[in-house]
């Protein structure tokens, strides 16, 4: 797996993962300015990008996912609840995507947005158990995603709490967490600069995860950072594709 810190926004992280032995790869949360990097990396690693996934309709960057898919012949994927003005391959909760020995399970994780997903990854060449979670903008190292980008922040904060406690913290403690952003991102407050953690470590040390649901909602709303710059324009562009 390659973790890409975006040159124009070092707080943002995207991913290229897959199976080198069978030459199949998956690109996740590609930025518009990073398309050539993905093409170059796929060529260098001798893999073909079969799937391009956006884990939600983003509000903090212009997506390059649809364009990369068009250039590579890949399938462009979003959750089935995503609202766009173009067609995409719709993903459902618990759906499995296979790229050679790599299996990716889709987890619908509403809270940051209604269409947010996380991706639970297993490398069958290593073993049958999940290895890591691309937690993207739902669960960060030391923090959680913001729930207010589309309004209804109180209700969405409650959904975020339920998602994290019912779907993510129930995963095995050894599973690594690879988020979609780190310190400096507008998508959450108090995010660590560390780009990786584990489920077990976050359960022990992420302060907001120990709060009651009511206190979680209060804390998340009280600590919201400013909205991403040009948010409305970015969302509209990503919905149009």
Image: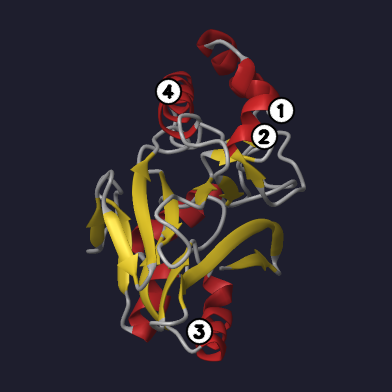
Number of on-image labels = 4
Decide: marks 2, 1 in contact (CB < 8 A)?
A: yes
Q: Which mark is residue 201?
A: 2
Q: Judge left or right: residue 228 versus residue 114.
A: right
Relative height, residue 56 to residue 123 (above, below): above
> In 3D space, how far apart are the residues under numbered discs 4 and 2 (Cα atoms)?
19 Å
What residue sits right under mark 3 in the picture?
42
- Residue at screen point 70% across, 52% down: 195
- Residue at screen point 64% across, 56% down: 12
Q: Position of residue 94 (x, y in %)?
A: 28, 45
Identify the image quadrant of residue 36.
bottom right
- Please tell me which of labels 3 and 1 falls first in the chain: 3
Q: Secondary structure at mark 3?
A: helix
Callout 1 crowding tier (Cα within 10 Å): few <14, some 14–19, many ≥20: few
Which tag is nearer the camera, tag 4 or tag 1?
A: 1
What residue sits right under mark 1 in the picture?
205
Q: Which mark is residue 173?
A: none
Q: Position of residue 76 (x, y in %)?
A: 32, 68
- Please tell me which of labels 4 and 1 falls first in the chain: 4
Relative height, residue 34 to residue 132 (above, below): below
């Amino acid at each position: 797996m390659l973790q890409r810190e975006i040159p124009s926004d070092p707080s943002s992280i995207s991913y290229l993962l897959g199976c080198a032995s069978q030459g199949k790869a998956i690109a996740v949360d590609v930025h518009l300015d990073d398309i050539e990097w993905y093409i170059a990396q796929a060529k260098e690693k001798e893999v073909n990008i079969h799937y391009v996934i956006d884990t939600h309709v983003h509000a903090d960057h212009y997506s390059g996912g649809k364009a990369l898919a068009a250039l590579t012949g890949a399938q462009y994927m979003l959750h089935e609840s995503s609202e766009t003005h173009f067609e995409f391959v719709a993903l459902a909760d618990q759906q499995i995507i296979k790229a050679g020995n790599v299996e990716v399970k889709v987890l619908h994780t509403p809270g940051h947005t209604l269409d947010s997903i996380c991706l639970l990854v297993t490398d069958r060449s290593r073993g049958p158990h999940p290895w890591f979670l691309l937690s993207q903008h739902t669960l960060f190292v030391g923090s959680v995603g913001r729930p207010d980008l589309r309004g209804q922040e109180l209700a969405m904060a409650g959904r975020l709490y339920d998602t994290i406690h019912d779907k993510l913290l129930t995963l095995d403690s050894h599973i690594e967490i690879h988020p979609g952003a780190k310190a400096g991102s507008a998508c959450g407050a108090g995010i660590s600069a560390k780009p990786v953690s584990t489920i077990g470590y976050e359960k022990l040390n992420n302060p907001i995860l120990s709060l009651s649901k009511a206190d979680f909602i209060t804390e998340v709303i009280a600590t919201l950072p400013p909205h991403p710059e040009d948010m409305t324009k970015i969302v509209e562009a990503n919905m149009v594709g």
